[in-house]
Amino acid sequence: MKHLRGILVLCLCLLSSLCAVRTPATAAEPARGETIIVDILSGRDANAGNFNLWVPGAAAPSKGIQQFMVRPLWMTEYAKGEVLNVLAKDPPIYNADFTQMTVNLRDGIFWSDGVEFTADDVAYTVETLMKNKGMFFNTELNLYVDKVAKPSRYQVVFHLKTPNSRFHSFFLDRWGAIRFMPKHVFEKVPDLMTFPNYPPVSLGAYVLADYDPQGFWFRWTRRDDWQRTVVGKLYGMPQPKMVTFYFYGPPEKKVIAQSQHELDMTDLTPEALRAVLDKNSASRGYRKQYPWFVNVDPAITGIQLNTDKPPFNLKDVRWALVLATDIVDFAMTGFDGMATMGAMLLPPTPAYTKWYYQPMLTWLENFTLDVDGKPFKPFDRSAPIRLAQRAKERGYTVPTSEAQIREIWGVGWWKYAPDVAAKLLERNKFKKGGDGKWLLPDGTPWKFTIITIPNAAHPQNRNAFAMSQQWKKFGIDVNVETLDQYATLTQRGMFDASTQWPAREPWGAHPDMFRTFDHWNSAYYKPIGEMAIAPQGAASRWRDPRMDKVVESLKATPWGNTERIIQLGIEGLKITVEEMPGLPTVAYPGIVGWDETYWTNYPGAENVYAQPYHHWPNFEFMLPFLKSTGKK
Amino acid sequence: MTFLRRYLLPRLFQYVVVIFVGTTIVFISTRLTPADPVQQTIQRITAQGGYMDPAAVEEFARTLRELYGLEGSVLQQYAALWKRLLTGNFGRSYTYFPTPVIQLIRTSLPWTLGLLSLSSIVAWLAGTLLGGLAGYASQERWAKWLESVVMIIRPIPYYIVALLTLILFAYFLPIFPISGAFRMGIRATITWDFLMSIARHAFLPAASLVVGGMGVWFIQMKSLASTVIAEDYVTFGRAGGLPKGKLVFQYTIRNAMLPQITGLALALGQLLSGALVVEYVFSYPGLGMLLYQAITQGDYNLTMGITMLSIMVIATGVLIIDLMYPLFDPRVRYR
């Protein structure tokens, strides 16, 4: 018993000493109030010591690499619908037949080790990527680039093998692009494929200070010469002395971390956001009040249908599924109203609303479907108003002005018209069985599966379950399967319906729809069993000669001719509305939690001066505008 | 000589067969999953928003297939795998290409080994000791009380135990950190500060594993000890007036321990697969998440590397225990 007591005392001593271990920060470390701590979107990086961004298993970019270490020529600012000139001084300049692209670079931009960024770095990067098989963009650059010329220290001219009016796309950063290698470092490395690029030199205003070899955190410190960076020149000094990227774990851990004021900016699930707002009075969402979500994310979510597989090859069936969906009920079930409805295969962000949804409003309202020889107008302008009303009934305070409601929830969606949906099916020989369930034309029960991501918090998963409820209510035997490999299955065409985005994400910052439409180009069509070029959009296997023509016309239209680009974009979108190759539901509803204990003036809905995410390459451009609360 | 022929050689043969069959099964199962490592890489790039020219996708896929060594038939790939493995080379990870698999394993392995071996041994020791005592003194009030507590905790899913531990001691009573293996900013060197930081970060995950794991050992041992105390030699020992300590530890616990030792060896062998839930809940580094990621990303080489290591350690553990049985139980030598 004496021994037992001794052991107990020893254990207690050890435990209390463990609890007491709180080593103070070292002298070199800035105070908490001078540091901003943000989440790592991609989670723990098991290969933490790798900062080489140009190889197939590239370093996780959102740990500070794409925010600070590298900078592109241009960047999409989708919150404002602008393309930013970053390392390039102005937009790309093409010759008449698109076989040459000239880029004028900013002068006075320096790498963190004091070497100036020049045309040498651009040319070296492109030539190195072309030489090294397997490196990012190796295939594309070899496909298009004949040679790179450097007429001056700050000018690069790309001579192309074939005309390409969108060649600059490879350098336009939208969570990925060709970013530049520091020539003076990389040219001394014998094997670039295995080079970890540590310690990395930065082109941004922060340089790597320290990282966790286990991949949970990465700390970047502000450069003393931040004036010699793009952000310094354009917007002034980034406010935090240090930026820490920290992965705390699943959403519940992020809630705890933010409640303890140890995580300033993070992505969350709607449930986690509610929890953190409840626990931490200093936390806020993108909007200060319900519905909190980010409505500028340039991705449309929904259901992708396999149009090579009966009965989804029938336009009537696809439209029947649309009309069998009560979007208000769907949005409340799946997202608790925290999402903007998008009637077209285009995200209803403010920029796209201005470029497309508003100009197409009259056309959408007058668009008709032929139902038993009578025209039926399916567009429903009132859907967002009804959604606001439903949210109010659920106890939320919602805006009262129609303009505000539409800004949050969209311009409209499609009518809930199960009777019309039934007629569309019946004219294709579908029947209702005695149990009220739909039968296929051959008399067998209509059953199908929606495949989706296992993560229950992801909008794709929410789309799957909310939509299956809608269609079950309509009398279709719909099942949902969650699979880790759902993206590959979608790409191979081994699916009926999938929650992979029904359309390729557009640029967000420019009205050009080439990026989206080209994925439906029949030249890239792959039959079921073969890999489609991408799991989004193209995997639906839908193609239409009219869309091919739009794609060709866009190719021939200069990037700067936005008037013509919008005209062609409208033309293409009209085809997608008529054909409805996939079902658009809501724009990607980003949910962010921001703690205002140490920092304020985040780019929320009331002050959209920049995109709102800490994991986008643009994050650095937000930092000069943050304001310290003065709390140490 | 008889021992060698009848006992050692069959076990060594069995050991080699287990490794061969295990490796082959893992190889086949990775190839059966629909996850294609090449497409996973391309998806990762495009899902992140990077612009990949549709005209270049197929060529890029071909290049990756070549770099990943996925050209040729499955049989050729299988032959190449053994050629590599026999030279101690697990190949390169596809997800983190071209980082060698062994480098990734080396980074995560010490954390898995440290946390899981320590907590498994503590849970085993506590469960075995308390179970043995409770089995010997099963009619005592404390033994009944202890059994009730264990019976309440044991069926609770480990995830709940872990989450409760975390919320209690990292949120309501914020005395332990909520994630990571050591404090941010600290240098990974052998210093008191660093070691204490490791211990502090490992405490909650380890405690949850001990609480969640000792119940099984306790119940198993209690039931074994209850059987052993009914044996004649214990009755004679007690009638002969042997001291209680000797009766408990040498007559009861020692004789009931054999299945527990086998269990421990197997449990320690399985450590190499990592503990996904503990790593997930406590954001603790280790092989579990790495393996999960490797499977979902179709990273054949990384999956093979971790599972191969696990198979080898389990097989070796079983072999060692098999060879050590005669030391624990003299009867084995005469079979």
Image (cartoon, grey):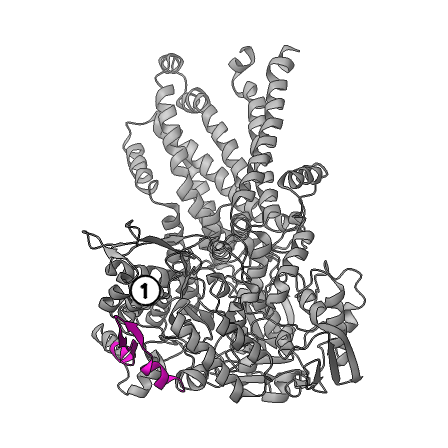
Residue B134 seen anywhere in this rendered image of the structure:
yes
Q: Nearer the viewer, residue B335 or A517?
A: A517
Q: Nearer the viewer, residue B174 or A289?
A: A289
Q: Is residue A302 above or below residue A397?
A: above
Give the letter of the chain under mark 1.
A
Does B165 sit left or right of B321 as displayed?
left
Task: Say which residue appears at 36% left-offset and 50% top-offset.
Answer: B160
Q: Which residue is mark 1?
A: A321
Could one spot residue A597 in this view of the protein? Answer: no
Q: Left of A426 or right of it: where is A76?
A: right
Magenta stretch, residue numbers: A359-386
Is A31 left, or right, of A296 in this rendering?
right
Image coordinates of residue B69 in percent, x first then y, are 68, 48
Q: For the residue marked with disc 1, what is the amino acid?
A: Leu
Residue A381 magenta-highlighted: yes
Instruction: Give the vertical position of A82 relative to A294 (above or below).
Output: below
Q: Which of A188/A121 is in front?
A: A121
Residue A454 inside the magenta-drawn segment: no
Q: Secondary structure at mark 1?
A: helix
Place residue A204 in its image quadrant. bottom right
